[in-house]
């Protein structure tokens, strides 16, 4: 473990249950010897990230630690935080990567990275029916049944390809499958020649606030190969965004115009 990692392990040793720690307690919680814990703790005191209380020989986190979080919160919306995560996978994993949210039966694209031309281009602000999109299925699957039906019935369901599901019972069954699996897959259901994997962004209560999707041209690889490659990345990005929203106590959130309900 490098010195930077060891220093952060000391900071993470503190928590609501143990706001103050001795050197021995720091050593035990970070799996280091007492000499190393002593040096790291006093280095962090010198840098201003720990306060030392000589009367009790204990240490506690200083207010300067808040700077580490406030700098990240300066750009305080989910699409801004999603951009670098999406750019990391397109084109390395997919031809495009998106963040979207539900709005009255539609998926609204909030952030989009396109690394290759596609039959259908989705820009930030564009919409598509949630019933026909993997991104919509990923979000809908984690809503209560009445909310699912309300979104699915919010607009006419028309076939966008011969593979598009439009029957309500078939869509509800698909959403149950998506929830059990943890992510959604579309193979030409929203547009011919496109394959998509999508995962939900969940808040602290498990409610979906958005979704992340990765899409490729079908000629690039089989659907099974794409799912095996892309699903872990879609899930990872969605979990990172969910964690950012939870840890910021809602400061990192969607723009006011769109959210699942």
Image: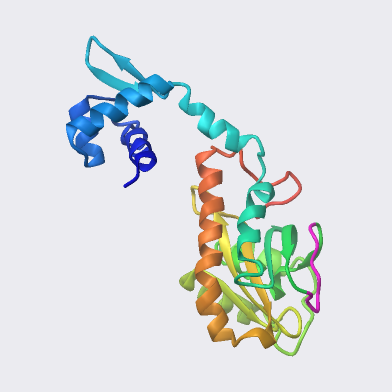
The verdict on residue 66 being magenta is no
| Residue 261 seen in this snapshot | no
Residue at point 22%, 16% (across, down): 57
| Residue 119 seen in this snapshot | yes
Task: Decide: is 49 above or below 145.
Answer: above
Taking depth in this image into account, of 145 and 212 the one nearest to the observer is 212
In this picture, residue 47 sits left or right of residue 53: right
Quadrant in which residue 151 is drawn: bottom right
Residue at point 54%, 37% (across, down): 249
Q: Is the magenta stretch mostly helix, strand or loop?
A: loop
Residue at point 49%, 47% (across, down): 204
Horizontal and vertical percent for residue 61?
Answer: 38, 24
Colouring scheme applied when the structure was drawn: rainbow
In this picture, residue 95 sits left or right of residue 72: right
Horizontal and vertical percent for residue 94?
Answer: 64, 72
Position of the C terminus, as image quadrant, is: bottom right
Which portion, as a residue range, is magenta? Answer: 117-124
Task: Decide: is 254 above or below 52.
Answer: below
Quadrant in which residue 106 is drawn: bottom right
Q: Which residue lies furthest to the top in this view?
A: 55
In this picture, residue 168 sits left or right of residue 26: right
Task: Decide: is 63 above or below 78.
Answer: above
Residue at point 66%, 84% (across, down): 220
Horizontal and vertical percent for residue 48?
Answer: 43, 21
Task: Decide: is 55 above or below 110.
Answer: above
State the count of labels. 0
């Amino acid at each position: 473990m490098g010195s930077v990692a060891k220093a952060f392990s000391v900071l993470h040793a503190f928590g609501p249950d143990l706001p103050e720690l001795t050197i021995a307690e720091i050593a035990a919680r970070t799996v280091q010897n007492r000499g190393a814990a002593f040096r790291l703790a006093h280095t962090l005191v010198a840098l201003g990230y720990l306060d030392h209380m000589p009367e009790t020989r204990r240490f506690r986190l200083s207010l300067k630690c808040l700077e580490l979080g406030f700098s990240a919160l300066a750009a305080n919306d989910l699409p801004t935080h999603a951009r670098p995560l999406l750019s990391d996978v397109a084109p390395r994993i997919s031809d495009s990567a998106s963040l979207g949210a539900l709005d009255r039966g539609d998926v609204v694209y909030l952030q989009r990275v396109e690394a290759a031309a596609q039959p259908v281009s989705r820009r930030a602000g564009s919409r598509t029916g949630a019933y026909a999109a993997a991104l919509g299925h990923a979000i809908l699957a984690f809503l209560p049944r009445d909310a699912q039906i309300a979104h699915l019935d919010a607009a006419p369901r028309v076939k966008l390809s011969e593979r598009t599901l439009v029957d309500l019972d078939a869509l509800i069954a698909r959403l149950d499958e998506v929830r059990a699996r943890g992510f959604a897959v579309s193979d030409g259901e929203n547009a011919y020649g496109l394959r998509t994997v999508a995962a939900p962004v969940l808040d602290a209560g498990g409610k979906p606030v958005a979704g992340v999707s990765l899409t490729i041209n079908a000629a690039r690889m089989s659907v099974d190969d794409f799912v095996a490659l892309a699903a872990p990345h879609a899930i990872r990005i969605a979990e990172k965004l969910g964690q950012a929203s939870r840890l910021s106590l809602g400061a990192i959130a969607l723009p006011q115009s769109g959210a699942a309900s």
